[in-house]
Amino acid sequence: MYFYILPGPFRLGFGITSNPENRAKSYTGAWGGEAEFKYLFEGPTPHVKRLENIIKTMHRDMLWKLDDWHTEWLDNGWTAEQLLEFVKDLIAERHLRVVQVK
Amino acid sequence: MIPVYEHVQRKPNVMRNRNPLKQSTSKIVKLADRIAELQGYKEWQKLIAEYQKKGVRLDPKLRPLIQNVKLKFLLIDEDIQRLLDAKHCAKDIAAIDRFDPRLLQVIYCIKIPGKNEYHAVDGQHTATTLAALVDAQLFDNETDWREVEVPVLYIETDSKAFARKAFALINGKGKKKISPWYEHRCRVMARRIDGSDEEEDIEAEEKQTICETYDCYPVDKPSAFQNLPGTFTHMEALGMNRATLEFCCKWHNQYFHYDPINGSLWFMMSDIKKEFDAAHIKITDKFLEELAGIIQGYFAGLAQYHDAVHAAHLEWSRKKYKYEVPWQDKCIAYVLIQLYKKLGGEQEVPEIMLDEFKNIMDFFAQDIKDLFVEAA
């Protein structure tokens, strides 16, 4: 399973996927422009899901909210590098078995 | 091999100061403060702007009126109200150890214009119970229930359709339901602020104290506190006995203080305690740390372990029995114990926990099983 960081046309995004290539293509199809994951992490499903879940629940105030829906786009003005450092810290702090592959 | 539990740096739990059940003195807020709070809410501001845009004007005469009405003037439309629940009257409203006339509720009615008739849309059980208690000569100086007056909140209309909607509204979404957390809060506050010596208030407060001792905090759902470390919304946990509750909270706080409490904690740890106690097997600190090591090392926490066991149970039942066997909560504890033994755990465990859900671990997702192989 993979965790990705994706600079979007309006905001910085993140998410998980078992197939990064296909997921990137679906963003490309939706945007009408090429989407490329800037940073990619890999690990066992529970660890990758936990990483995503920590951001989506325990740090939900960072997320862009559409009505009552907390999206997978940040709304705190962070760059991809800032999110990268945040994710690296979480991995180290929580001993998650997730490694950066890109 | 069992993964070694890795220490996670403990940070001060923010709930220690933000816990809404912390206060031990009452706090009075003026209505004006509440209004200001509402007026600061964006959705409210949008709503008022919409009212103004549409030029909506409201008639103050349409607000409900209140009056003391003799019970003999109350009527119940069976096609609007539910049938009488006599058990509810006997076992709940008038229960001898609970009935308090001061807690009788106002009756909601529709008044037919020009007639002294009040059609109850909510409160028929209160009115019926009160009348029957008077009829049983239990109230001093009152013998005829027909002449007893009750407070009635009413609106005047001859529209039955309106009465029907009013009934649905009062008994449905129009009323903000009291959540289990709020009920618990009332009991804890009754003890902490008012010094209540009622048994259920004392018990609720003691259980709250157990939770707080281990930085575990019941919170309402939804609330701003949800998903903070140590918080939980699974209020059924407070139905456990004190020793089991403490066992669960202590384990969470020792090893997973950095996470909110996943509901599976209560099932898993209480089943482990129950089975070990029944088999007269002592639970050691080393064993508890080993369990935490498995949960942390292979599943990154209880939430993902819970998900993984659910998924494995589904696959296991489809393959083994050719249909989806209904989920059993004890599976969470049993599978953990089986995993513990598979990984070489040396602590004696109750045999019964190894007998059910056989081979279920074969149905964990492959990338989880790869971790087991890697560790072997």
Image: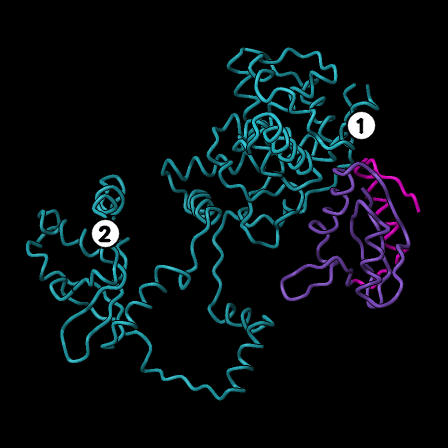
Chain colours: A purple, B cyan
- Identify the secondary structure beneath mark 2: helix
Q: Which of marks 1 and 2 is in front?
A: 1
Magenta stretch containing residue A98, yes or no?
yes
Chain letter behind tag 2? B
B115 relative position to B202: left or right: left
Whole-angstrom CA distance, mark 1 to mark 2, is: 64 Å
Q: Is residue B188 above or below residue B49?
A: above
Give the quadrant of the C terminus of chain B: top right
Please tell me in which quadrant of the rendered image residue B342 appears. Answer: top right
Q: In this view, does B226 lie above or below B241?
A: below
Give the label on residue B101, or none.
2
* Mark 2 closeness class: few <14, some 14–19, many ≥20 residues within 10 Å: few
The amino acid pointed to by label 1 is Leu
Tell me the residue at 81%/53% (across/down). Answer: A23
Relative depth, front residue between B373 and B30: B373
A20 relative position to B126: left or right: right
Relative depth, front residue between B35 and B177: B177
Magenta stretch containing residue B323, yes or no?
no
Report the magenta residues as a range. Answer: A76-102
Tell me the residue at 64%/66% (across/down). Answer: A67
Per the image, the residue denoted by label 1 is B371
Relative depth, front residue between B173 and B24: B173
Give the label on residue A16, or none.
none
Please tell me in which quadrant of the rendered image residue B272 appears. Answer: top right
Q: Is residue B96 above or below residue B57?
A: above
